[in-house]
Image (cartoon, rainbow, N blue to C red):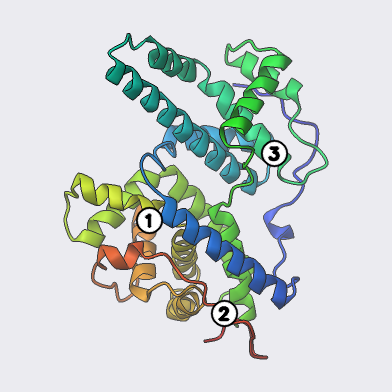
């Protein structure tokens, strides 16, 4: 399938990514802000959140973002925008169905909403990618012509007006709050801190592997978290209640970030794995056992390896615990976040 490619080069590559160029005070403030955002997201996690990070959907977004030469951050943001939007739509359909069942009326309204959502899913997905591209601070974004041509190749004929209405529907559904945090922001901020703290594995080297593993976790979201849940409760058949409680873990981007970095460190230089783990624990306050368990789940689904000195499965309450920001207001000359 051929898609129209925007006539512009990729604005940055992995080799262009720089660490150590930001003042420590800025890093501390940003990491504290991310930790607060993460804690709020974990506390509010419930219901169907995470249900639409399905492999085929994520793969579609990733391939489309690559075809349009978008940054990795845009593809993750697009997935998160689509996820939040679809959850809102699903909740609305369920709410309409409940109202109609209680009123004993014909269930035409919610069925129509469901059919409309199904018929316009590809349009909404593409709108989420386009909106994410507008948040990436590029002087060029994905044009409406490019989007319409792509949709036409799939057999979907839409007008510019319908495309704009689709974007507006997504924006209104999310109350125009689409600048959502992504796991990549947590990964890159923690790598920045590790660099200042004297991590033996270079941040740029870890960054490249982290991107690969983060893609993997997004594409294998359900299997990775299912294996983590089973290990956490020491049971191969989790109950429905245990699965519902585990939703908060799926929305814990700080936990995901430390797991990604720890797994990357093991792949790059397993002899430095323990040191990286110690740094991550000091920075985030997440238990070493939780970091090890998550990195093991990631490694099992990627290279099939096990972490050195694999820990016993950690209890659910340790894994699901919202991480605290461990950044002190001051830092020693040897590097920030030393505890």
Q: Tell me the element at label 3.
A: helix
Q: Give neighbour class at mark 1: few <14, some 14-19, many 20+ (Cα, 10 Å).
A: many
On screen, residue 295 versus residue 183, left or right, reads: left
Q: Residues within 10 Å of mark 2 (few under 14, many from 20)?
A: some
Q: Is residue 321 left or right of residue 191?
A: left
Question: Which residue is tagged 3?
Answer: 133
**Crowd band around label 3 with a 10 angstrom C-alpha radius: few (<14), some (14–19), many (20+):** many
Which dot, 1 or 3, sits closer to the camera?
Answer: 1
Q: Earlier in the sequence, mark 1 or mark 3?
A: 3
Q: Which residue, given by chain and number where applicable, does mark 1 sit on? A: 249
Distance from Cα at disc 1 to Cα at disc 2 = 27 Å
**x, y (%) of residue 209?**
54, 60
Q: For residue 96, which numbered disc appears in the image?
A: none
Q: Label 3 near label 2: C-beta < 8 Å?
A: no
Q: Is residue 153 left or right of residue 269?
A: right
| Residue found at the far bottom of this picture | 333
Quarter of the view holding residue 304 = bottom left
Residue 250's place in the image compared with 50, above or below, is below
> Residue 289 location, x and y as percent?
33, 73
Q: Residue at x 28, y 18 (%)?
A: 101
Snapshot quadrant of residue 255: bottom left
Residue that extends furthest to the right in the rendered view of this protein: 139
> Of the residues tagged 1 and 2, which is closer to the observer?
1
Q: Earlier in the sequence, mark 2 or mark 3?
A: 3
Q: Which residue is mark 2?
A: 199
Taking the image as shown, residue 163 lies to the left or right of residue 217, namely: right
Give x and y (percent) for residue 189: 61, 66
Q: Quadrant of the N terminus?
A: top right
**Mark 2 to mark 3 CA distance (whole Å):** 33 Å
């Amino acid at each position: 399938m051929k898609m129209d490619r925007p006539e512009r080069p990729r604005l940055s590559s992995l080799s262009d990514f720089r660490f150590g160029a930001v003042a420590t005070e800025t890093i501390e403030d940003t990491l504290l802000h991310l930790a607060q955002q993460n804690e709020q997201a974990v506390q509010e996690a419930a219901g169907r959140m995470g249900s639409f990070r399905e492999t085929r959907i994520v793969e579609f977004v990733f391939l489309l973002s690559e075809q349009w030469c978008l940054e990795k951050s845009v593809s993750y943001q697009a997935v998160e925008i689509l996820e939040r939007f679809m959850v809102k739509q699903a909740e609305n359909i369920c709410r309409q169905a409940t109202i109609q069942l209680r009123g004993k009326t014909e269930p035409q309204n919610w069925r129509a909403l469901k059919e409309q959502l199904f018929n316009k899913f590809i349009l909404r997905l593409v709108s989420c990618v386009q909106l994410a591209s507008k948040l990436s601070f590029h002087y060029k974004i994905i044009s409406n012509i490019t989007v319409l041509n792509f949709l036409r190749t799939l057999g979907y004929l839409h007008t510019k007006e319908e495309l704009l209405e689709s974007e507006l529907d997504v924006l209104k559904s999310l109350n125009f709050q689409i600048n959502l945090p992504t796991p990549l922001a947590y990964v890159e901020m923690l790598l920045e801190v590790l660099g200042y703290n004297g991590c033996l594995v270079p941040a740029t080297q870890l960054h490249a592997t982290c991107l690969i593993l983060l893609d993997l976790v997004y594409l294998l979201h359900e299997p990775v978290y299912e294996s983590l849940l089973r290990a956490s409760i020491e049971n191969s058949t989790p109950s429905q209640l245990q699965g519902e409680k585990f939703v908060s873990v799926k929305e814990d981007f700080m936990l995901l970030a430390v797991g990604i970095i720890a797994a990357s460190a093991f792949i790059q230089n397993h002899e430095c794995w323990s040191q990286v783990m110690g740094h991550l624990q000091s920075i985030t306050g997440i238990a070493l056992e939780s970091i090890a368990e998550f990195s093991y789940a990631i490694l099992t689904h990627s290279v099939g390896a096990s972490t050195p000195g694999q820990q016993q499965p950690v209890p659910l309450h340790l894994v699901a615990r919202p991480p605290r920001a461990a950044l002190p207001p001051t830092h020693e000359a040897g590097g920030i976040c030393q505890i």
